[in-house]
Every structure is written in structure tokens, then in C-alpha cells.
Amino acid sequence: MGKATRKDQVLASLITVALSLPCCAGVVFGGPWLINRYLGLDPLTEEEVRNGRACTATVLSIKDMNSTINRAEVFGFRLQVTPEDGIVYEATVSEPLNALQAAQVKADGTRYRCIIDRDDSSRVKVFWSEATSTPHG
């Protein structure tokens, strides 16, 4: 067997903590949290979206995370984020995309509307169906 990655070690630690909780509480209440943490999913709440900072995101690279949530493939994205009120930076996000979105989103220079969490600029919500410009027009 190969060497355990950092991600595998973190998952093992999280599972150990969840299993140490009384009865089934770790599975019932901690299961979705463990899955989200393992896949790197950290979606903004509705309130965080309402109060967030407007931006545009350009996909620099896409990675298939080899996971599915509710029939949506989970992808990792390296983004160039351009806040309306700040300096351009790079962020990494993971999100499940349905089949139509997955077929349309490419690392081709297309810019998408997005929102940045006011308290943590690494947390970005991209609106994949709202392209603001494309490289060809």
C-alpha cells in the first residue's frame, strides 16, 4: 500500500473523533460534516451570500475529486478572484456540479459572478450559471 496522504490522515482523525461520540450521534450529526470536510466543501450560508463582497472568478484549473453528492460530481477549482473593491488573488474551492454545469465550466477564461465571505476571503461562492464574460465575446 502507498503512503497515507495528509488528507487521509485528517479523515482518519475526524472519523476517530466522530466514533468517540456517544451512541450514534457521531454518525447521525457528524456524518455530513465529515464528508464536507474531507471533500473540502465549505459553502456560504444564505446570510453570508447576502452580506458578502461582490467579485468575479476565472477558473484557472479544474480537478475531478472522484466523489458524488446527490448525483452531482464534486470538482476542485483553482480560481483567480477579482473583488470589486480589492486586489486580485487566487483561491481554491470545491463544489458539486450537475451534469450540465460540469459540461459548461472550463478553464478557458470565462468569468463568473461570485461572492466572497466578508470574514474569510478564501471562502468564495461561484454562480456557475452566471457567466459575466467569455473569452470569445
Image (cartoon, helix red, strand yellow):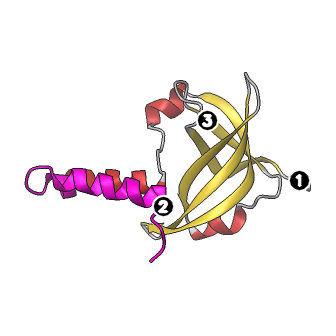
Q: Are marks 1 and 2 in contact (CB under 8 Å)?
A: no
Check the image and name the residue furthest to the bottom.
1
Q: CA distance from mark 1 to mark 2?
A: 37 Å
Q: Which mark identifies residue 5?
A: 2
Residue under the point 45% across and 64% down: 4
Mark 2 burial class by Cα count in 10 Å: few <14, some 14-19, many 20+: few
**According to the image, label 3 marks what residue?**
115
Check the image and name the residue furthest to the top.
85
Quadrant for the N terminus in the image: bottom left
Prevailing secondary structure of the magenta residues: helix
Residue 127 visible here? yes
Q: What percent of the width, then of the height, locates residue 125?
A: 58, 42
Mark 1 or 2, closer to the camera: 2
**According to the image, label 1 marks what residue?**
135
Up the image or down, 42 lies above or below 87; here it is below
Q: Which mark identifies residue 14?
A: none
**Labels 1 and 2: the sequence-earlier one:** 2
* 18 falls in the magenta region: yes
Q: CA distance from mark 2 to mark 3?
A: 31 Å
Mark 3 burial class by Cα count in 10 Å: few <14, some 14-19, many 20+: many
User: Foreground residue, 45 or 21?
Assistant: 21
**Labels 2 and 3: the sequence-earlier one:** 2
Check the image and name the residue furthest to the right.
136
Residue under the point 55% across and 37% down: 123
Identified by mark 3, the residue type is Ile
